[in-house]
Image (tube, rainbow, N blue to C red):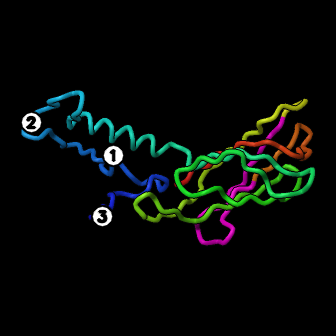
Amino acid sequence: MSITPTGYPVWVRANGHTAYGGHINKTNYQSVGTINPRTDLSAENLCRIAADLAAVARTAPFSVVAFQCNDAVPAAPTVSKYFAMAGTTPTGTRNGDGDITFVWPESFADDYGIIANANIVAAVATPQQTMAGMLFASVQISDADADGINETVRVRVVDATGAAVPDAIVSLTTWTG
């Protein structure tokens, strides 16, 4: 028999504690608490776990991408690490020195096959290399196909004078909602 989980996949950010099994009126069966604390959860334990998990799900990043721009011999960026709630590495395109655009699919399926949109609502890019002077990274989130779902993030890396930084190494973190 197949199970269909309650609620939405975590990246939609629409689940409250009840989607994780919490309930403000949850009680222990026959008012008996934990019988074996090494193996059992009480209603109180489960409610705390559900509330904490809902809080983590509301704030956790959707993805973290570590990449290097390939500007010396112009090419797409090299992704060295990718961590995400769902899906595979986004497609990266070089726009110019220190200027990359990543495109994610608009929706993903969770482990149970439930499909939900992944609308990017926030992003932060951080340069990871040291050079003389300061490096700055900016992000621009957009909806490339105008369907109401932001799936594109453009990252630009510049130095203190505003000049593009070739072959920049960057960490990009995104949040959905």
Q: Are marks 2 and 1 in contact (CB under 8 Å)?
A: no
Q: Nearer the viewer, mark 3 or mark 2?
A: 3
Quadrant location, the N terminus: bottom left
Rendered view: 148 above or below 120: below
Q: Are marks 1 and 3 in contact (CB under 8 Å)?
A: no
Is the residue marked by circle 2 packed among few (<14), some (14-19), or many (20+) residues within 10 Å?
few
**In what element is the residue under mark 1?**
helix
Rendered view: 98 above or below 45: below
Picture quadrant where residue 165 is located? top right
Q: Which residues are magenta?
A: 135-154
Q: Nearer the viewer, residue 64 or 35?
A: 35
Which residue, given by chain and number where applicable, does mark 3 sit on? 2
Which of disc 3 and disc 1 is earlier in sequence? 3
Amino acid on which disc 2 is placed: Ser
Distance from Cα at disc 3 to Cα at disc 2: 31 Å
**What is the x, y in percent for residue 101?**
75, 58
**In what element is the residue under mark 2?**
helix
Q: Residue at x 70, y 56 (%)?
A: 153
Q: Nearer the viewer, mark 2 or mark 1?
A: 2
Q: Nearer the viewer, mark 1 or mark 3?
A: 3
Picture quadrant where residue 91 is located? bottom right
Which residue, given by chain and number where applicable, does mark 2 sit on? 31
Q: Nearer the viewer, residue 54 or 79?
A: 79
Which residue, given by chain and number where applicable, does mark 1 sit on? 17
Q: Residue at x 33, y 46 (%)?
A: 17
Residue 152 within the segment the image draws in magenta: yes
**What is the x, y in percent for residue 140?**
72, 54
